[in-house]
Image (tube, rainbow, N blue to C red):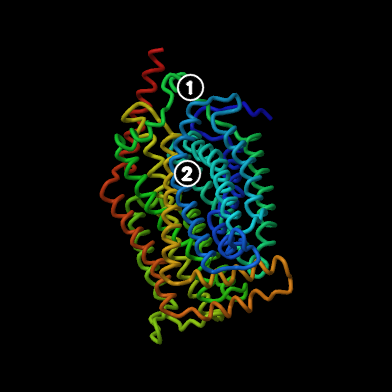
Amino acid sequence: MNIHKTYTGDKVPKLTKYLYPASTIFRDSAYTLVSMFFMTFIQFCAPLGYAWVQEGSVNSGIYTSQMLVISAIIIVLRIWDGFNDPIMGFIIEKCHFKSGKYKPWILIGGLSNAVVLFFMFYLRPVGWWYVIAFGIFYLLWDFTFTMNDIGYWSMLPSLSSDEKERNTLTTLVSVCASIGAFTAGGVIPMVASGHAVKAYWVVALAIAILFAASQIILYLFCEEHTRANEEFERKNEAKFSDMFKILKDNSQTRVATIAMLIYYTSSNIINGFGMNYFYFNYGYGTGTGGSVQFYFLIAYALGTIIAQVSFPFLLKKFKRSQLMTYCFIFVLVFYLIFFFYDLKIGNVVLGFRDPTVGVTPNMPDIITLCVIGVLMFLGDGLFYLILLILMTNTIEYNQYTTGERRESIIFALRPLTAKLASALMQGILSIGLISAGLYTISNSINNLEVQKALDDSVDVITQADASIKTINDNQLFIFKCFFVLIPLILFIVAYVLVKKKYFIDEKYYDNMMKEIHAKEDSKVEQK
């Protein structure tokens, strides 16, 4: 074992080729725990609703105020995090360790983030003290995960410049990321409801340990690519302003970045609204809303994994532009079908079934819902993989037009868009909950879960479902408009932008790489 060992050429060593993608399974489980469930944990489990001096009584108005402050903190920190990502990319470009350019950051960020992750779900100060503690720990989580995330994703394009090799590696990374995300996303709803406080910190502990272990394995056994232009990189160290220069001068990076921001916003809205919607529509228990969400997450996972597994084969049969159009049609059709499924306004049923709050739909209804989900997320998953390749290819375009790759800075734009999109989603989620008048229901469930943590005899499920049954159909209609129609509109905008403004197709990329290799060969001959 040699942690300093590197390799040359475009063929990725087998151990690295499979360990590097596999290491993200628990990394993405950890990220999913926070990105998909931390706000749900706070909404339903945090000891909120208490004033500074009145810790013995719970107040719905104080709960709403504290939730809005937490939402505001998340929005501010995620926006900051978006700009912190390029700063981290700049630091990675500037620092040179003996054990690698990327691996040290992956290890340091992963280990420290695992510790912070556990305490985010374990510590429970009360009321406004919780809001303050939340701000501190969320900032620490954000900072440590950024170190790991930028290091990890910046390493990906550096492993190979061969498009086929990179496409295979990108697909493997995406499959492993989905395994981690969907495992966490499927298991947590099934174990949380009714005793959520304890369940969340146990899950956080398990994921934190596995996350830390996976990053240690990556550090010890994966190889980085030899930096052929290390001397050039040292003489031309990146500056933070380079990010803005690249966005200004590199039209293809700019288009891919904007499209990725729009896509992530659309996807995050589906994830952010999903758990709330299934709870409020079908009931809080694992036998009602929890089970429906679990089935839908299986459909989500199945559709996405089918997309990832089939992606390399589809690229052999179709051009990326053709495949993107097919994805667009799939998403458009099945998002609309999903919107009208179990939709009801007043006494008028607009969808395919008449929903009853707190009652799990029968198996034919569940199968119908899952088929819709699989096809919807099949198109969505393929679209994301295409966007990922489009953004990756702009690294070579930057090298082609300027002579500099700047992969750490360009690839830092991907998590930047994810964080900005997450901030937008949080704002939209708060507006959606307020517009539909659902924060009061959240507050009542929150009180029950907090009581359950102190007194195991509390019947959370029965009392929570009684509160949920007070929700009317118009409230659910408003919430579903936020949940489905806004993401669909954003998806359409992203598709149109790429079709109109992005021009690096397969032929253009091949010609571009021939010229880049010719220039590199010429430099070698001159030496």
Badge 2 marks a residue whose secondary structure is helix
**Residue 230 disc label:** 1
User: Which residue appears farthest toward the front when viewing the image?
Assistant: 53
**Residue 279 disc label:** none
* Residue 165 or residue 84, whichever sits in front: 84
Left or right of residue 480: residue 199? right
**Quarter of the figure with residue 164:** top left
Q: Residues within 10 Å of mark 2 (few under 14, many from 20)?
A: many
The image position of residue 443, as x and y in percent, is: 55, 69
Q: Is label 2 or label 1 in front?
A: 2
Which amino acid type corresponds to the residue marked 1 in the rendered image? Glu
Residue at image point 35% right, 65% down: 332
* Residue 435 or residue 54, whichever sits in front: 54
Left or right of residue 502: residue 425? right
User: Which residue appears farthest toward the left when viewing the image?
Assistant: 500
The image position of residue 338, as x and y in percent, is: 42, 71
Left or right of residue 47: residue 78? left
**Residue 81 disc label:** 2
Residue at image point 49% right, 51% down: 73
